[in-house]
Image: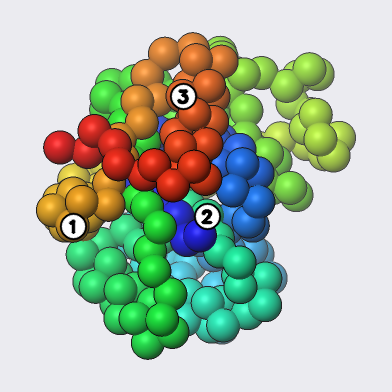
Amino acid sequence: MIVVLAGAPGAGKGTHAARVAEVLDVPHVSTGDLLRGAVDSGTELGKKAESYMKGGELVPDDIMLSLVAGLLDSPEWERGVVLDGFPRTLPQAHGFDALLKERGRPLGRVLLFDLSEEAAVDRLSSRMWCPKDSSIYNLKTNPPATDGVCDVCGGPLERRADDEPETIRARFVEFRSATGPMIDYYKDLGVLTRVSTEGPIEDVSRRVREAAERLTAGDGVGDGR
Ligand code: AMP
């Protein structure tokens, strides 16, 4: 099953994507992580994406669509995938539809992680991440066992370059103008399920797991209106 995770910056896509993927038994892929990896290793893709990412802007749609087109044909995605952060604009959603149609593959569901902007900004300001394995922590609500150290790999935690206050604001403007129309599109298609990510992490984890379990039971119809 192909599942798309959508949501404002800080809504919890990165934190909960792995759980959704685990329940569905498919890989999870964050286009943000793929791009950050490409920037770090200085690939052609990374060189093209870097300046957009630093300013909190979206990478152009044609670059994103060719990245995903290549991955759609990889054996790892054969049984499905949980996509965190793609599509993110209406043209990407249309392009993705076309890629899936060409391959005769259906879009399973779009899960919209729903969080107020105020709560999201608060979360992003205290977010830390591990650049080695992409684990995400929150200094207030989900701190690592040892200060500044990743629980999973023991590597040093960092603040993401695009979690600086100026960049956070730019990402929100971008989300409303570019991703808003995509969400309306999926809502009109009847494939959107809203999951509130407001509140303590344990409650959010439970709601996300339940939403994913409903997908495996074939009951994808949510309260997307
Ligand atoms: P994320 O980790 O999902 O917040 O993504 C970090 C950054 O990567 C974004 O601010 C964009 O610059 C870029 N990015 C990730 N996914 C996409 C996408 N689907 N379309 C355009 N840019 C993207």
Position above or below: 57 against 66: above
Which class describes the residues within 10 Å of circle 2: few (<14), some (14-19), or many (20+)?
many
Distance CA(mark 2)–CA(mark 1): 19 Å
Question: Image check: 112 left or right of 216?
Answer: left
> Is residue 67 among the parts visible in the rendering?
no
Is the C terminus in the top left, top right, bottom left or bottom right quadrant? top left
In this view, the residue in front, 156 or 98, is 98
Three-letter code for the amino acid on which mark 1 is drawn: Leu
Indicate which disc, 2 or 1, sits on the residue closer to the N terminus. Answer: 2
Q: Decide: marks 3, 1 in contact (CB < 8 A)?
A: no
Residue pointed to by mark 2: 82
Residue 115, given in percent of the width and then of the height, sits at: 32, 27
- Considering the numbered disc 3 on the image, is that residue within a helix, a strand or a loop? helix
Label 1 secondary element: helix
**Please, what is the three-letter code of the amino acid marked with disc 2?**
Val
Relative image position of residue 181 (x, y in whole percent): 15, 55
Q: Nearer the viewer, mark 2 or mark 1?
A: 1
**What is the number of the mark on residue 189?**
1
Q: Residue at x 27, y 46 (%)?
A: 192
Q: Pointer 1: residues within 10 angstroms few (<14), some, or many (20+)?
A: few
What label does residue 207 carry, if any?
A: 3
Q: Alpha-carbon distance for marks 2 and 3?
A: 17 Å
- The secondary element bearing badge 2 is classed as strand
